[in-house]
Image (cartoon, rainbow, N blue to C red):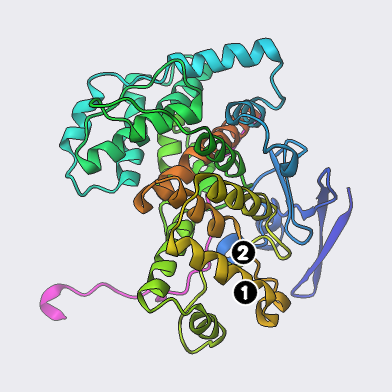
Amino acid sequence: MGTAKLILDGKEHDFPTTTGSEGEVGIDIAKLRAATGAITLDEGYGNTGSCKSAITFIDGERGILRYRGYPIEQLGAARFTEIAYLLIYGHLPNAAEFEAWRDKLTRHSLLHEDMKKFFEGFPATAHPMAMLSAMVASLSTYYPDDQDLDLNIVRLLAKAKTIAAFSYKKSIGQPFMYPRNGYNYAENFLHMMFSVPAEPYEVNPVVARALNLLLILHADHEQNCSTSTVRMVGSSGANLFSSISAGISALWGPLHGGANQAVIEMLERIRDDGGGYQKFIDLAKDKESGFKLMGFGHRVYKNFDPRSLILKAAADEVLDELGIDDPLLDLAKGLERVALEDSYFVERKLYPNVDFYSGILYRAMGIPTNMFTVMFALGRLPGWIAQWKEMREEGYRINRPRQIYIGETARDWVPVERR
């Protein structure tokens, strides 16, 4: 442990530093205000470590992402439920643990029958993310805090995909399809999304593998907006379901989970304009145009997003195996090729990110655009749970950021008749 020195108003103050297992250095300013009367100002928290965590490591400069020490490049062949167990409990399950875990996730997929009435109360135009957030919060009314936490974790993971699929069915006016015990996590979701009572439905294994991969690649990503929200809400002592519901709401924002939807909407705009993507690349270079090339660059990764490299290969494979002929997907590949060769994007390291490829894959899989963020939420669920659980186990204080007040100074109130 080292020391950092701060000089304020001519006085020197020493603050301890802490170093993470990957060499990250943090200055511990817990006693800054007590020692100096000052606080730090870091709008957007871009330089503030809000916690210590053993779950996910990111090195944005080198394009590294690891879950519990395992490189993301090695996890693509795993099962999503394995990765969920890893994130939540800190180790990969052995055969017996995994069998028991998988069986619990299967057996708890059904929703309480009364919950179907909640869906009836939503308008047909309700966004699936609004329904997902509301329904997850409502789980706390069925499974109180004083019950087994591990069982509530299973319930949340198992039922979230059912809620998501029911939200979609509600939006298109089709009957709900119940989960089937013979399917794995990804297969069950696809069954509940796309099957109907009138005819048999076979889950496409190519699509199921692609969905499994997408869920894994989104499973956690350190202290992003939604994860920080889960921790913030959980720090008040709020239960698991309400904390995760808050994270879902944070993810709904277009600057966070809505980015993959924005990619497809951008491609639709280019298509409707005639398909000339060079025009839009030129617009992206023009600071006065106000146009942004969605799906390129990343807040954390200053090199390349390792998830995007995995998804690029998967997208090529899936589109080829499914034999899909979609002008929008052709546009995306052309846009990607030009951007990767253009010096403007190369010099600024504006590589295609995970949102660029995930939107393309979801579209190829037949998942509608308004469900893209829901898919992101399903993938991120294990990370949110792991982060909430870690916070509780490590001990915590209620989160309470400070501020720099810039409003009016003290002034006297004037009765309305004298104003």
**Residue shown at the point (16%, 73%) measured from the top left:** 415
Residue 46, quarter of picture: bottom right
The quadrant where residue 412 appears:
bottom left
Q: Nearer the viewer, residue 77 or 327?
A: 327
Residue 317 in the image: state x and y as whole percent: 60, 48
In the rendered image, residue 210, in percent from the top left (x then y), is placed at 55, 40
- For marks 1 and 2 on the same chain, the one whose residue lies earlier in the sequence: 1
Q: Tell me if I can see residue 399 in this picture.
A: no
Asked whether 221 falls inside the magenta stretch, the response is: no
- Check the picture and name the quadrant holding the C terminus: bottom left
Please provide the residue range marked out in magenta: 394-419
Q: Is residue 190 left or right of residue 150?
A: left
Q: Which residue has dot 1 on it?
A: 339
Q: Is residue 133 above or below residue 149?
A: below
Residue located beneath label 2 in the image: 352
Label 2 sits on a secondary structure element that is loop
Q: Is residue 8 visible?
A: yes
Determine the residue located farthest toward the left in the rendered image. 417
Secondary structure predominantly adopted by residues drawn in magenta? loop
Under circle 1, the secondary element is helix
Residue found at x 32% / y 44%? 128
Packing grade of label 1 (10 A; few <14, some 14-19, many >=20) is many
- Picture coordinates of residue 390 (x, y %)? 63, 32
Query: Residue 30 in the image: x percent, y percent?
Result: 69, 50
Residue 41 quadrant: bottom right
Vertical side of 385 occupied by 126: above or below: below
Name the residue located 41 percent from the left edge and 20 percent from the top edge. 109
